[in-house]
Amino acid sequence: MVFLLFTDVIFNVLDSLLYSLPLMVMFAKFCNVHNTSVLTGSMNFGSSSISPGIGTWINYKWVGVNKRDLSNYSTLVLI
């Protein structure tokens, strides 16, 4: 449990440093966005609401994994 919590913290920080911040800076420079709260809010909404929703929709529409039938779980992980 300690390993999972420790690696989760480390990888979240690395994700922010190596992916999110450069992307946000590049977007702000290209679009002349001065209000960074809108940019941060839209990125947080996308990662916390849109991404899980799309994954759930893909599972429901094409794969069909549920708690009783995990036969296509490898396909879902691959997608």
Image (tube, rainbow, N blue to C red):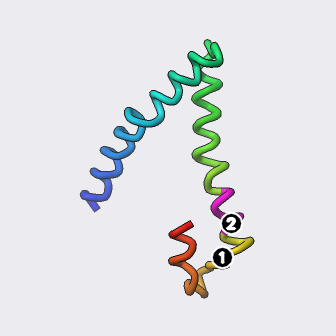
Q: Which residues fall within the magenta stretch? A: 53-58
Q: Residue at x 71, y 64 (%)?
A: 57
Nearest to N terminus: mark 1 or mark 2: 2
Q: Residue furthest front?
A: 30
**Residue 51 to residue 71: above or below:** above
- Quadrant location of the C terminus in the rendered image: bottom right
Amino acid of disc 1: Val
Tell me whether circle 1 and circle 2 mark residues in contact (CB < 8 Å).
Answer: yes
Task: Please tell me how crowded label 1 is: few (under 14), some (14-19), or many (20+) other residues with Cα within 10 Å.
Answer: some
Instruction: Specify the label residue 63 is tagged with.
Output: 1
Q: Residue furthest left?
A: 3
Q: Residue at x 61, y 12 (%)?
A: 34
**Residue 51 to residue 20: above or below:** below
Considering depth in this image, is 11 or 76 the residue closer to the camera? 76
Q: CA distance from mark 1 to mark 2?
A: 7 Å
Q: Quadrant of residue 16?
A: top left
Q: Percent position (x, y) of residue 2?
A: 25, 57
Amino acid of disc 2: Ile
Q: Quadrant of residue 73?
A: bottom right
**Residue 79 to residue 22: above or below:** below
Task: Please tell me how crowded label 2 is: few (under 14), some (14-19), or many (20+) other residues with Cα within 10 Å.
Answer: some
- Which element carries disc 2, helix, strand or loop? helix
